[in-house]
Amino acid sequence: MQVTIESIKQEIEQFNEEQLKEIAEFIELIKFHTRYQKSVTDLNQLATLYQEFAQEDRELAEVGMADYANQLQQEDK
């Protein structure tokens, strides 16, 4: 079965009011699933970015601590 916009329109034009309501609900369900799938993908991307930045932050903190320790030693002199 080949699905085209025109074939779907032709089928829908034959539906009664109750069937049209069901189609409208189904369309909303598809939209919801599409939004949900995008948000899950976004959450996975955010988790990956968080891990990458957390590692970078740890590395920068280590470098910063060494500089800070050097500055404290110079103040003591």
Image (cartoon, grey):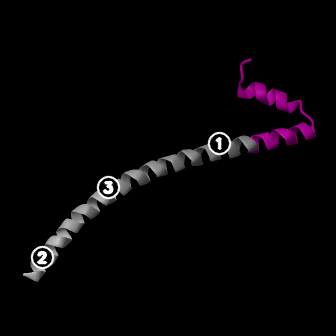
Query: Disc 3 designates what residue?
Result: 56
Residue range corresponding to the magenta coloring: 1-28
Q: Which of the two residues, 76 or 57, is positioned nearer the viewer here? A: 76
The residue at 18%/68% (across/down) is 67
Q: Nearer the viewer, residue 42 or 8?
A: 42
Q: In the image, is residue 38 part of the stretch drawn in magenta?
A: no
Q: Secondary structure at mark 3?
A: helix
Does residue 26 show up magenta in the picture? Answer: yes
The single residue placed furthest to the top in the displayed view is: 1
Using the image as rendered, state which of residue 61 and residue 43 is in the foreground: 61
Which of the labelled discs sits on residue 34, or is there none?
1
Specify the quadrant of the image occupied by residue 5. Answer: top right
Q: Is residue 5 left or right of residue 63?
A: right
Residue identifier under label 2 = 73
Write the residue at 68% across / 43% down: 33
Residue 23 appears at what percent x and percent y? Answer: 82, 38
Task: Give the image location of residue 52, x and y in percent.
Answer: 37, 51
